[in-house]
Image: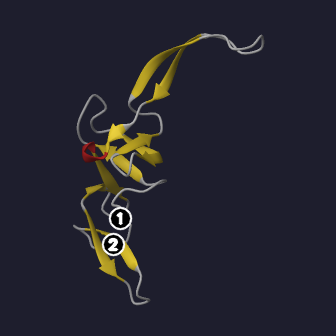
Amino acid sequence: MQKIKKNDIVQIIKGKDKGKKGKVLNVIENGKRVLVEGLNLAKKHKRQSSQDQKGGIISIEVPLAISNLMVFCKSCSKPARVGFNIAKDKTKVRICKSCKEAL
């Protein structure tokens, strides 16, 4: 089980967007890199591909290393380390290490 999954709210702890929060759009490269919605933007020059599409400079999200992110815990409202517990119905559950709540 991975510590960061799609649709998690994460906070960036390193880099140019340090301290910002966003939603995980996609986990790629065997869980090593993550796309975060609206963060780690890069400019890309795009050519006009058809008559109705415009060309120009657009901003796209670039993958971040998973080591530069922490899952944001809603119950203690701060970035948290992730642990695992076995629930009563024998399923593995991700928990916040500080407040012991399920993520």
Residue 86 lies, with reference to residue 31, above or below; the image says below
Q: Residues within 10 Å of mark 1 (few under 14, many from 20)?
A: few
Q: Residue at x 23, y 68 (%)?
A: 97
Query: Which quadrant holds residue 56?
Result: top right
- Residue 8 position, x and y percent, is 43, 55
- Taking the image as shown, residue 49 lies to the left or right of residue 19, namely right
Judged from the image, the secondary structure of the residue bearing numbered disc 2 is loop
The residue that mark 1 highlights is 75
Q: Foreground residue, 65 or 99?
A: 65
The residue that mark 2 highlights is 101
Residue 57 lies, with reference to residue 36, above or below; the image says above
- Residue type at mark 2: give it: Glu
Q: Foreground residue, 48 or 71?
A: 48
Q: Residue at x 25, y 46 (%)?
A: 67
- Taking the image as shown, residue 7 lies to the left or right of residue 70, namely right
Q: Residue at x 66, y 10 (%)?
A: 48
Farthest front residue in view? 30
* 2 or 1: mark nearer the eye: 2
- Residue 31 position, x and y percent, is 36, 51
Q: Residues within 10 Å of mark 2 (few under 14, many from 20)?
A: some
Query: Which quadrant holds residue 82?
Result: bottom left
Farthest bottom residue in view? 88
Residue 43 lies, with reference to residue 75, above or below; the image says above
- Residue type at mark 1: give it: Ser
How far apart are the two marked residues, 2 and 1, measured between alpha carbons? 7 Å
- Residue 70 position, x and y percent, is 29, 51
Q: Reading the chain from its start, which is encountered first: label 2 or label 1?
A: 1
- Residue 60 position, x and y percent, is 49, 26
Decide: marks 2, 1 in contact (CB < 8 A)?
yes
Farthest right residue in view? 51
Q: How is the image coloured?
A: secondary structure
Determine which of the numbered discs, if any, sits on residue 25 in the image. none
